[in-house]
Image (spheres, helix red, strand yellow):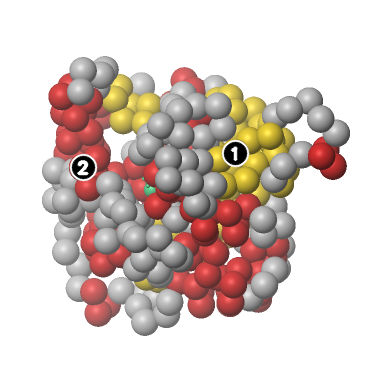
């Protein structure tokens, strides 16, 4: 089976780490490199986390390319209240030697531009953090995102409320100008918005009954990394769970048959005091030429249980995990 080359652009964060585990546990994919970007945590913290996750998975040879340490225009925002100060909840990751990390010294934007230009139509980019690196790549090489076979983005909210403001999802809120630039890039885009990612989650019972008993370094990492998020749910009176936002973007690359996609005309608000980062979806019953925004394929429905089973079996690389 020919492996699909992918580049994962990420701001590790807990669900980013789960997305890395899913991508690296899926034999359909050839992860060419990990690009890091400021988002959930500052760039240096996220880059260190990416290195630690690769080391945990025994794949330290995969190159990491540090990227943008701030958004295109707005001030940086982080999500340490959700992911913890380290970005990995309460998990302790190994501290590999940064000097030995492959990819070191090559900027993520240079890696994106060079790889997409050298292999047009072949590489899938999976972006699960703010889109700053992708927007800078497009700025550096106009049309370069169109050279990707596909650009899968976790971000935005179509009909679902936001998760960082009433109307904005974190990745698009953290760099709205980048999100708008990527949406208008003409790339072969698929977006996994909160409308879809809020359908897939790890419940506390899944962690206690289907992950903790595995009693491996990987399962313990997942238990420790998600502990903060479960505690925070309890603090705010919600059912303890961890949304699988970023893993679902990887799911769009390995199991698109589990997802229902709808073409929606979208744009991103880049100046509203109250609406910064909002996805404005034009779903009016009007002729397409009169629509606002750009038509983009958006994941709107997920076969959640099937995806969760796939996710759990892949991240622990147990073909017949009794889950
Ligand atoms: O809104 C969810 C997104 O924001 C995920 O990518 C999560 O990691 C955070 O970056
Ligand atoms: Ca993320």
Q: Residues within 10 Å of mark 1 (few under 14, many from 20)?
A: many
Q: Residue at x 82, y 39 (%)?
A: 290
Q: Residue at x 22, y 33 (%)?
A: 229
On screen, 55 above or below 172?
below
Horizontal and vertical percent position of residue 211: 26, 29
On screen, 131 above or below 289?
below
SS label for mark 2: helix
Horizontal and vertical percent position of residue 258: 59, 28
On screen, 22 above or below 320?
below
In the depicted view, which residue is nearer to us: 237 or 293? 293
Q: Residue furthest bottom?
A: 105
On screen, 252 above or below 95?
above
Mark 2 and mark 1 in contact? Answer it, CB < 8 Å: no
Residue identifier under label 2: 81
Q: Quadrant of the rendered structure where residue 71 is?
A: bottom left
User: On the rendered structure, is 254 left or right of 75?
Assistant: right
Quadrant containing ligand 1 reads: top left
Distance from mark 2 CB to nearest ligand 1 atom below 8 Å: no
Q: Which mark is residue 280?
A: 1
Horizontal and vertical percent position of residue 114: 58, 77
Q: Point out the tag, 2 or 1, that comes first from the N-terminus.
A: 2
């Amino acid at each position: 089976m020919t492996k699909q080359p992918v580049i994962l652009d990420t701001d590790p964060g807990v669900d980013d780490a789960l997305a890395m585990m899913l991508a690296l546990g899926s034999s359909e994919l050839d992860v060419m490199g990990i690009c890091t970007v400021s988002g959930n945590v500052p760039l240096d913290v996220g880059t260190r986390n990416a290195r630690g996750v690769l080391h945990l998975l025994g794949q330290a040879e995969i190159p990491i390319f540090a990227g943008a340490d701030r958004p295109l225009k707005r001030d940086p925002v982080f999500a340490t209240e959700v992911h913890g100060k380290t970005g990995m909840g309460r998990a302790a990751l190994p501290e590999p030697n940064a000097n030995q990390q492959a990819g070191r010294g090559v900027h993520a934007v240079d890696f994106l531009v060079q790889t997409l230009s050298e292999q047009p139509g072949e590489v899938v980019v999976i972006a699960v953090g703010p889109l700053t690196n992708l927007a800078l790549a497009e700025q550096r090489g106009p049309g370069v995102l169109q050279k990707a076979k596909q650009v899968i983005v976790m971000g935005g909210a179509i009909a679902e409320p936001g998760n960082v403001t009433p109307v904005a999802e974190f990745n698009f809120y953290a760099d709205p100008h980048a999100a708008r630039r990527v949406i208008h890039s003409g790339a072969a885009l698929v977006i996994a918005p909160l409308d879809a990612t809020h359908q897939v989650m790890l419940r506390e019972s899944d962690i206690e009954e289907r992950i903790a008993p595995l009693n491996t370094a990987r399962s313990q990492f997942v238990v420790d990394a998600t502990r903060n998020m479960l505690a925070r749910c309890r603090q705010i009176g919600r059912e303890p769970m961890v949304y699988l936002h970023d893993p679902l973007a990887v799911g769009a690359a390995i199991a698109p048959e589990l997802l229902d996609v709808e073409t929606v005309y979208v744009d991103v608000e880049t100046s509203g005091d109250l609406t910064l980062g909002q996805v404005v979806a034009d779903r009016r019953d009007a002729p397409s030429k009169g629509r606002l925004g750009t038509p983009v394929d958006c994941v709107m429905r997920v076969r959640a249980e099937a995806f969760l089973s796939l996710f759990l079996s892949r991240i622990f690389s147990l073909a017949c995990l009794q889950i």
